[in-house]
Every structure is written in structure tokens, then in C-alpha cells.
Image (cartoon, rainbow, N blue to C red):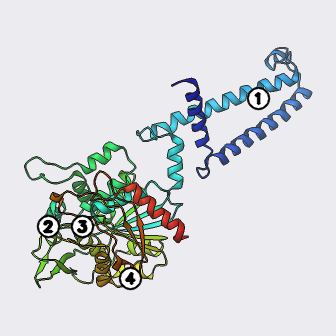
Amino acid sequence: MNRKERIREARDRLLKWLRPGIYVKRWLVMLFLGILFLSVGVGYEMVHMYRTVAFPREAYYVTLQFIDRFWRGVLFIVVGLILSSTAVWQLSRSVIIPLMPRDHSELSDILYRYRAQGRGPRIVTVGGGTGLSALLRGLKQYPTNLTAIVTVADDGGSSGRLRRDLKVLPPGDFRQCIAALADAEPLMTELFQYRFDEGGDLSGHSFGNLFIVAMSRITGSFEQALKESSRVLAVRGQIVPSTLEDVTLLAELEDESTIEGESKIPHGPAPIRRVFLRPDNPPAYPEAVEAIANADMIVIGPGSLYTSIMPNLLVPGITQAIKASRALKVYVCNVATQPGETDGYALSHHIKALQDHVGLELFDFVLANNRYLFYKPEWHQVAVKIDDRARSLGVTIVPADVVEDTFPTRHNSLKLAQALMDLYARRGR
């Protein structure tokens, strides 16, 4: 790095401390005023003592009276500034730096993120699975107050085993959301997502799932376990279940048969006609309802239409709260169809399915991908396209390029978050 680059880097670091909203400049001004008043007070006392007290001869040299009075003052000011700034810097190194995360973030950036959190729009996301966690990874880059409402209908894989064996709510989707919003060291997040793949009873389980279940035993409740797990990983925002009821998702298929279990529904012998919960009227989690009531923007999806999004919306209290909210309400449609759930679906099929299940007033805008990439035949998926029928279903279609270039069946977290924040800036304020 040459001299110009070092000067530019030093300047950029200094300018970061001048950004509005990190609550540093005001305290620096107060510190300066405090030192100024202290210096004036000491000066008055020194003048008084100089006039009334007989000092020994050594004081003449200690107070540098052999130097011109003007330059003597300049010298004391410069030395005082050097000593004060050095003391503040070394104090911060001694007290603050040991407490900083080891991700090489600058202190000014950490302060900015901390102050910005909670000052932006209150955003509530509703869903589950990889779609919701992808959305959260993008939104956490913005100064927002995030609440993720997560489904509790998962009954497959590690979550399903823990749910059956230990009678707990399925932790898998919550684990993914915690990892997505975590501000902890990357190693901690990687540990939380670690999955045991060796043989034995732990095979297939993820460390994060076991951690949440163990925490629920220690704290006495699943919701408290989520809060403590979020605290351990320095999560930005809160993650809450749509209900604490032990619900089961069922699907009625077009051939009149019924399938029980979220993990089994995509493998049914016929297309899905409708899904429903058992019990059919679970109480909504109060903190989820409160978050919806206070939201500035509510984002439904992305995620599996029938097995990640619907289980939340089939909780009556959640749907009623969304309909009653005056927030900007957006449905984010998937970028690709999902085998066994939405085969052959265009955008209108997704919207119509939601309207058939929970009514017409749930959302005003639909954010849909308008950049269709190549899909390999072996993926058994195609792009969800914006069709003409979608524009006649009483909602405003917002087309945007939100697809992940290297994984065209999923959203790009940053592009999706940018599209939502742009929509909020245009329509939500």
C-alpha cells in the first residue's frame, strides 16, 4: 500500500466516525467542552494563586515562563491535545477492543450497525424453510427492525425426529433463521448449522437443532429457548413461532385422498387441492400478533407455498392480524416451481391458491421475478412466470430481477432485499 492509499484509508476511517446516527460526535463535542471548562477553571485558579502565593524559584522553569506567553499557551494546548487523544485511544483499546467480535469489523462500523438496528422500518416476515432465511440474510444488511414469524408444522428430517421423540416444536426452520440473522463470529454460525452425518443416533441431526431443544429444557419453554439462542448468536431482530400449538399439516388432493404430514405432502399421488391444520383453530402466538400490529411492512414468503407459507396463514389469529394491519403487505412469489407442490404453476396459480385459502385482503403487492434463467431437465423445475391472469386478481404485480444467477431456483438475498426496500421507499411511507 503506497502513501496515497494509506492517507485515503485513514481519511475514510475518520469520515466513518462522522456519519450521522452513531452517537459519537455529540459526546466528542461534550468531552471537548468539558476539557475547555476544566482548563478555564484551572487557569483562573492558577492566576489567583500566581497573584497571592509566593512560588519557589523552580516554578519559573516548571511553568516555562522563560518562553513567550503566546507560544507557551500554544505549547500547553498541543501537549494537552496529544495526551488527551492518546489517553482516549488507549482506553478504548484496553476496554472496548477485547469485547469486539473477531470478524475484523471496524469499531465505527459496529457502532453504526448497532445504532441503526431498530431505527428503520419495522418489517415482519412470514414463512419458513430456505426461502425465509434467504430473505432475512438480505434484510439484515439494512437498518430495520426485523421479526420473523416461522411455521411449526415441520415434521421431516432432524426436526421431525426431535418433535416425535422429545415432544418439542420443530427447531429446524428456527435454526436457519437464527443463523441467517446472526451477527456472531462465522465459526459460531457454522457450528450452529453443523449436521452430524456419521452413523448412530445423532446421524442427520444438526447441532443447532439439538442446542435449541437443550435450551428449551434449561429455560423451561421453547419461546424462551429461541430468545436465549438468539442472544448467544447476537441475532439482529426476533424470531417467533406463529403458534405454540402442536399442529399437523394435512393436504386434500385432487383425487379426493388426504395426506397427513408436511414432509409427505410433496410426495402425494395427485396435485394439491387445499391444505389445512389439525387442530384447525390453533391460537396465534401473542408476540407474533403484536409484531404484525406494529409493522410498517409485512412480507409473506418466499418459501414452499403449501408447506412453509400456508401453515402460518392457517393460524386464524395471524391472518386476522395481517388483514387488520395498515402496513405495506407484500407477497414474494417463488422464482421456480417446487416438485410435488406447485408443478406447472404460474404466478396467478400462487396468488389464487393463497386467496382461496385465506381470502382476498391479505396482501396488496406481489413481488415476482421477471428474469427467467435456464433450468436443467433433471431439476424437474421451471421458472414461475408472470402471466396475464395474475394482473386480474386484484393485486399490484411488482416485477423485479431477484433470481440467484448461480442457483436459478432460489432468490438472491441482496437483490430481493433491495427490491423490497425500494418498494417500501416508494409505497410504504
Considering only order in the chain, which callout, 1 or 2, is on the residue closer to the N terminus? 1
Q: CA distance from mark 4 to mark 2?
A: 44 Å
Alpha carbon separation for disc pair 4 and 1 = 73 Å
Q: Is residue 120 left or right of residue 82?
A: left
Residue plotted at (10% across, 82% down): 257
Residue occupying the point 29% across, 50% down:
406
Name the kind of residue labelled 1 in the image.
Answer: Ile
Which residue carries the number 1 mark? 77
The amino acid sitting under disc 4 is Ser
Q: Which mark is residue 337?
A: 3
Percent across and percent down for residue 11 are 61, 35
Under circle 4, the secondary element is: helix
Q: x, y (%) of residue 160?
A: 16, 64
Q: Check residue 392 in the rendering and tell me which mark sits there, or answer none.
A: 4
- Tell me the element at label 3: loop
Residue picked out by circle 2: 164
Q: Label 2 near label 4: C-beta < 8 Å?
A: no
Q: Position of residue 167 (x, y in %)?
A: 18, 67
Question: Quick one: 428 or 74, which is closer to the camera?
Answer: 428
Mark before the other along the chain sequence, 4 or 2: 2
Q: Amino acid at mark 3?
A: Thr
191 relative to 84, above or below? below
Task: State the SS at label 1.
Answer: helix
Q: Earlier in the sequence, mark 3 or mark 4?
A: 3
Q: Earlier in the sequence, mark 4 or mark 1?
A: 1
